[in-house]
Image (tube, rainbow, N blue to C red):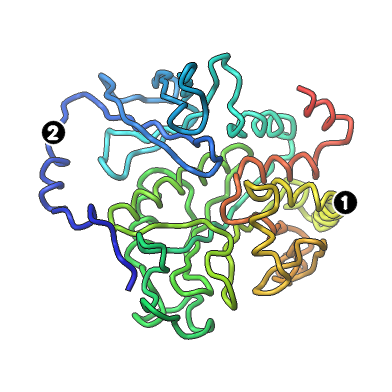
Amino acid sequence: MASVSVSSHLNKGLRQHYLSLPQGDECQVTYIWIDGTGEGLRNKTRTLEREPQTIDDIPEWNFDGSSTYQAEGSNSDMYLIPVRMFRDPFTLDPNKLVLCEVLKYNRLPTETNLRSGCNKVMEQVKEHCLWFGMEQEYTLLGVDGHPFGWPTNGFPGPQGPYYCGVGADNAYGRDIVECHYKACLYSGVKICGTNAEVMPSQWEFQVGTCEGIEMGDHLWVARFILHRVCEDFGVVATLDPKPMKGNWNGAGCHTNVSTKEMRDAGGLQYIEKAIEKLGKRHAEHIRVYDPRGGQDNQRRLTGFHETSSINDFSAGVANRGASIRIPRQVGQEQRGYFEDRRPSANCDPYAVTGAIARTCLLEEGEEEEEQSK
């Protein structure tokens, strides 16, 4: 059995006594940001004199970028710019979680602040009403790095009974999944579903429908909430795209995409045009679909375990072994959305949605102009 953290054994009933104390009119605001790895999340909390009503009520703040892989100690102050506010499911109302962009000393975006560029693209294509839904797969581990619930010196039975499974021998860690779901609903994150995945101790939650930049914001905060819930239970959620070698499924972040034209009658023709454009830029998308330029996805996109090959682009109706899947219902109704199955579980959703928007909706001249800014 995988080990859990020491802090998870602390007296949670005693903790609840302090959390239930009144706090007057003051409000705790937890600032959340992406660190210099492009994958890690950081946070710190401050007191405001009153509950903020909008994002504009939350002041800029700063942090030590030399401790987050984002600056040198001689010039370490970084700006935190609040961009989206949520209710805090851990310390409850009136407290808030606030997602922030990070700016350098010169107030330019940091290298891992991909939100800034994504937002510019989404503004350019907003007339298309671009909708996304992202399916975040993840794997639960003990603090020793061993999959949660797996035998200490061995493996569980082969894949088969675990996907959407039920029962103590099939579902490992459902308490975490259900607590995360409720916490997201409370916070205002647009979580729309969850299920057990093909590999035991692997799960998925879905976020959407979100329009434009909203997709990346909601998925990053859903990830933060997942890590916080896991912290309380003493386990670790990894977004590694292939956490276990061998005959086990990897973890992706399948991305569902539609425009107003695709959703309207006869929209399949617009879906097919978008897929044609994506095919021409397959290599470019693979480079931005994981934080290491395709190296992480190389372990996952093998052509096996419900994936396409990283080297080849493919598309098909109801085909989970293709790069792009057109759902069967979409093929029948001739309108709807398509699913890009290539993004890795640890992708940056700003990079993924921004690349899809540029490729599918910007003409070459517009795209060159955008990239030069």
Dot 1 amino acid type: Lys
Splitting the image into 4 quarters, where does residue 46 fall? Answer: top left
Q: Nearer the viewer, residue 219 or 157?
A: 157
Rendering quarter of residue 19: top left
- The CA span between labels 1 and 2 is 58 Å
Q: Amino acid at mark 2?
A: Pro
Q: Quadrant of residue 279?
A: bottom right
Q: Which is more N-terminal, label 2 or label 1? A: 2
Task: Give me the disc on residue 26.
Answer: none
Quadrant location of the N terminus in the rendered image: bottom left
Report the residue marked by disc 1: 280
Task: Name the residue at 49% across, 60% down.
Answer: 138
Q: Nearer the viewer, residue 228 or 177?
A: 228
In the rendered view, would you say 153 is above or below 50?
Answer: below
Residue 206 at what x, y percent from top left?
Answer: 52, 57
Q: Residue 182: horizontal and vertical position, in percent?
A: 35, 54
In the image: residue 262, left or right of residue 192: right
Q: Residue at x 59, y 78 (%)?
A: 247
Q: Which residue is mark 2?
A: 22
Q: Residue 345: x percent and y percent?
A: 57, 56
Q: Determine whether the residue tagged by mark 2 lies in a helix, strand or loop.
A: loop
**Residue 99 at x, y percent in the picture:** 46, 33
Position of residue 50 relative to residue 290, above or below, is above
Toward the top, the furthest residue is: 106
Q: Nearer the viewer, residue 15 or 42?
A: 42
